[in-house]
Amino acid sequence: MSLRQQFTDSMLRYLPDGGRIVVGFSGGVDSRVLLRLAVEYRTCCPSTSIVAVHVHHGLSDKADHWLALCQQWAKEEEVEFVPEHVQLNLNSGDSIEQQARHARYQAINQHMTHDDVLITGQHLDDQAETFLLAVKRGSGPKGLSSMAACMPFGKGTLVRPLLGAQRQDIEQFANDEALQWLEDESNQDTRFDRNFLRHEVMPLLSTRWPSFSKAVNRSARLCAKQECLLDELLKPELDSCLIALWVSR
């Protein structure tokens, strides 16, 4: 299935009538493609409005330049652009990756209203990395379910329209559309666990087993289904216990 079809199917399924598309717009190739796909979707559904939110972490000396480029690209696509500046506590002991992710979602959440859909650019290879990170932590089915294609977020919904696509498909689309995008030099730093997996581990696994990412994604979906089934089976028991506790008070 093409990226366009995947994106369209996601929006038809998850975007309510009158809802906005909020693009988490870092300027990397994934979000750059998402912005273009959102604009194409708006052409078919003119009532759809789009806002691109760019979060400036201040971690790179290029951050101001990146913000300016993202603003320019959003203007070219005739999309509303919202910059957000965040500050991280680099001495907190928490990983920079985790802090940046939390701050990014917190900043974007401020712009979510009822019926909005936040779209982010995670794809099949990201899902495999997330799964392997969960394995490293010794996670159970909930952790191994990795990233959901859709989940509640703030007043709206977070949707990952490209979760079934591979990185190479996204880059091919960007090249076919003659898109420009940002290259964050920190993404090459293999001191970070995800980058180590991306540059050192995943190429070996994919060379040995070309369908590895797809197989991992299938395992993640099975773990997610198992979690949902457990919730359904245990909810009556939990409700019964809560009622008994309330009556006994």
Image: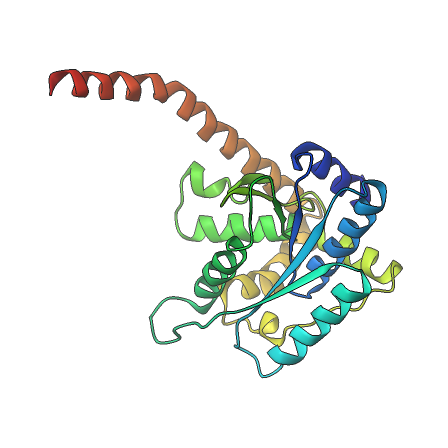
In the image: residue 246, left or right of residue 46: left
> Residue 133: where, in percent of width, then height?
48, 53
In this rendering, the answer to whether 131 lies above or below 72 is above
Q: Residue furthest bottom?
A: 61
x 51%, y 33%: residue? 224
Task: Indicate the quadrant containing the N terminus: top left, top right, bottom left or bottom right.
Answer: top right
> Residue 45: where, in percent of width, then height?
81, 40
Give the camera-side residue of 109 and 191: 109
Give the camera-side residue of 24 and 186: 24
Q: How is the image coloured?
A: rainbow
x 47%, y 57%: residue? 106
Count of numbered marks: 0
Give the camera-side residue of 234 and 100: 100
In the image: residue 181, left or right of residue 201: right
Q: Residue furthest left?
A: 249
x 59%, y 65%: residue? 200
In this rendering, the answer to whether 162 lies above or below 110 is above
Figure quadrant of residue 147: top right
Figure quadrant of residue 53: bottom right
> Residue 58: where, in percent of width, then height?
53, 77
In this rendering, the answer to whether 86 lies above or below 208 is below
Figure quadrant of residue 25: bottom right
x 48%, y 70%: residue? 86
> Residue 105: where, in percent of width, then height?
51, 56
Task: Indicate the quadrant containing the C terminus: top left, top right, bottom left or bottom right.
Answer: top left
In this rendering, the answer to whether 127 lies above or below 79 is above
